[in-house]
Image (cartoon, rainbow, N blue to C red):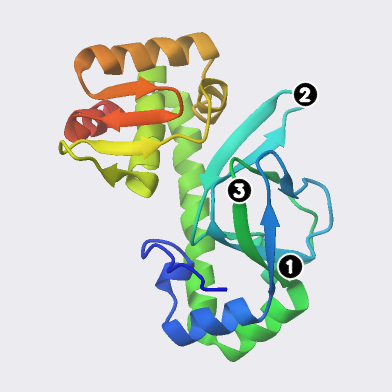
């Protein structure tokens, strides 16, 4: 199987060609269909998954039973990296939002590989620290920012990660999450998220349709995310 090149601004994309090939050879190819669980919260963390194709949502059930979307991962990301350094249960679930292909790497193989490839260990540390920083920023955002700002921030994340240049200069993003999932990810109600999207459309920052986002004014969208 010919594997796609990972995006540069990702964990896999930060590895050297030799380290990337070695890491992927340490595991086995696996595929998941839309709606299928890659990992389940509470299960033993016996492996990590290097994502090659497709998008997944990282989620957890709150005490009251509602699903909370913690993040979106895609090609080049590594799921379950904590298993490389400590034995623990899965802290969250990961669900395929579309057809997904990845490489499942057993904990023993991942730890052995990291011992033999210190540059990959540093990349893994950078990944973990980056996620801790993002989590801190998200908590601060939830306490101090408006729904409009939070929704705009999530759209910026999607645009930066999954956007592509359209024929008319706009940035097009094929959405794999619905409005309810966007609301959860933004720590907002469905109603307030809908209002925020309507405001961004009225400002001319975005256009939306089913499973599609067009960013007409990226700088305006970023300004709303910083407000």
x and y percentages locating residue 130 in the rendered image? 46, 57
x and y percentages locating residue 139 in the rendered image? 51, 35
In the picture, the disc for residue 86 is 1
Task: Nearest to the eye among marks 2 and 1: give it.
Answer: 2
Q: CA–CA distance between discs 3 and 2?
A: 26 Å
Question: Does the image show residue 68?
Answer: yes
Q: Residues within 10 Å of mark 3 (few under 14, many from 20)?
A: some
Is 18 placed left or right of 184 in the picture? left
The quadrant in which residue 137 appears is: top left
Residue drawn at 20 percent across, 29 percent down: 216
Report which residue position mark 3 lands on.
Answer: 99
* Outermost residue toward the front in this view: 1
Viewport quadrant of the N terminus: bottom right
Question: Does the image show residue 85?
Answer: no
Q: Point out the tag, 2 or 1, that comes first from the N-terminus.
A: 2
Contact check, label 3 and label 2, Cβ < 8 Å = no
Report which residue position mark 2 lands on.
Answer: 65
Position above or below: 110 against 167: below
Position above or below: 65 against 79: above
Residue drawn at 61 percent across, 58 percent down: 101
Q: Residues within 10 Å of mark 2 (few under 14, many from 20)?
A: few
- Residue nearer the viewer, 221 or 118: 221
x and y percentages locating residue 9 in the rendered image? 37, 61
- Looking at the rendered structure, the secondary structure element under dot 1 is loop
* Outermost residue toward the bottom in this view: 116
């Amino acid at each position: 199987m010919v594997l796609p090149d990972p995006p540069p601004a990702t964990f896999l994309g930060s590895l050297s060609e030799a380290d990337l090939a070695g890491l992927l050879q340490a595991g086995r190819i696996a595929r998941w269909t839309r709606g299928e669980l890659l990992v389940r919260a509470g299960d033993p963390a016996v492996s990590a998954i290097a994502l090659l194709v497709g998008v997944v949502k990282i989620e957890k059930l709150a005490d009251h039973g509602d699903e909370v979307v913690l993040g979106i991962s895609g090609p080049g990301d590594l799921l379950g990296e904590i298993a490389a350094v400590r034995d623990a249960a899965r802290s969250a679930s990961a669900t395929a939002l579309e057809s997904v292909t990845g490489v499942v790497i057993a904990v023993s193989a991942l730890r052995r590989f990291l011992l033999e490839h210190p540059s990959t260990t540093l990349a893994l540390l950078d990944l973990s620290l980056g996620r801790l920083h993002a989590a801190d920023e998200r908590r601060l955002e939830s306490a101090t920012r408006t729904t409009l700002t939070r929704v705009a921030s999530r759209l910026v994340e999607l645009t930066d990660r999954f956007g592509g240049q359209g024929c008319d200069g706009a940035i097009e993003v094929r959405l794999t999450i619905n409005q309810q999932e966007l609301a959860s990810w933004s720590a907002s109600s469905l109603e307030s998220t809908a209002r925020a999207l309507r405001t961004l459309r009225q400002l001319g920052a975005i256009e939306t349709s089913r499973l599609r986002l067009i960013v007409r004014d990226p700088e305006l969208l970023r300004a709303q995310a910083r407000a």
